[in-house]
Image: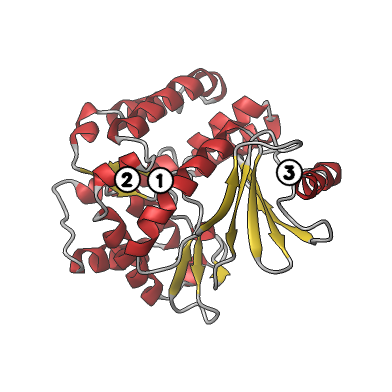
Amino acid sequence: MTVWWSADDLAACKSALRDSGLIEPAAELTLLGEGFGSAALETKDGVVILVAKNEIGTGARRLAVSLLPEVAPTLPCETPRPLWSIDLAAGIPWGAWAYRKLPGQLLTDANAPDTPLPVAVDIGKFVAALHKFPVDLAVRAGAPEAHALHDDLRLLHTRIGPLLRERLRDDQYPRVEDWWQNFLDPSLKRLPPVLTHGDLFPQNLLVSDDGSRLTGVLDWGDAAIADAAYDFATLQAFGSRFAEVAISACLSQGSSKPEGFDARVQLYWELRSSGFFSLRASIRENDEAELQHCLQELRDGPILA
């Protein structure tokens, strides 16, 4: 996806932050990374500033700033704690927010398979605590309600369907469409909802310097009231054994495992590992190179492979 800021974009953002009085005039800023919705900058004294680049980043900022102060005290690991937040400023039309950098090192897709199993135990305990947070309080703090994720997935299917019909082979498209019809079964909307993080991929998890324990969880922009199985699907990126240990650790904290749970974890993993969300973004950005990458990810993924 062509989302990376140019040197001019970065310089303009730094200037806007200084001119708005959000950082000191002489403050040094380093670009930590970017996503579809926001860019992350860090000051020399360890403050992370997330600058929204579009409405996706704005929504993620508003949710995190509202939800995290309520949820963070109930969790067994660190999460970002907002220092300040703005809706807009000159040169920052989509807003920004800041938090003190958390201790630990980021996991990556590359090192995920080697992550020690004690980290899986810590993740399971984190998920158990998160899922116990009162749903009504989460909704009041801005978390999308239970139907919102399901509705968005229907919109996702509608948005990418025509392109999949055009770009996939005649023997591939019907298989993908059959998968979607099964996935969008209305029964998924009737499951007991909990507060989910929604994006527990390696790059959103912090571990201790020796890599043995979970220290923090980042990127709360996809938090929502949803099926508990949704939070365990992305842990398949670490391998099935890792995911099993995390689920067992969650159950040890008093969580339940309803009928059909394992099948739904697999279904959600198929959703998350098939490039559908990135495909929608590549259509929105008219990025042919990323679109081709997403289609290959789908062809290589669990639905078609």
Closer to the chain start, of discs 3 and 2, is 3
Q: In this rendering, would 181 be left or right of 187?
A: right
- Closer to the camera, 101 or 5? 101
In contact (CB < 8 Å): disc 3 and disc 2: no
Circle 2 is placed at which residue position?
138
Along the horizontal axis of the image, is 117 left or right of 186? right
Q: CA distance from mark 3 to mark 1?
A: 24 Å
Q: Position of residue 270 (x, y in %)?
A: 39, 43
Q: Residue furthest front?
A: 21
> Depth-wise, is mark 1 or mark 2 nearer the camera?
2
What secondary structure is found at the residue carrying circle 2? helix
Q: In this figure, which residue is indicated by the disc labeled 1?
A: 223
Above-or-below relation of 279 to 121: above
What numbered label is drawn on residue 4? 3
Residue farthest bottom in this picture: 210
Residue found at x 34% / y 49%: 196
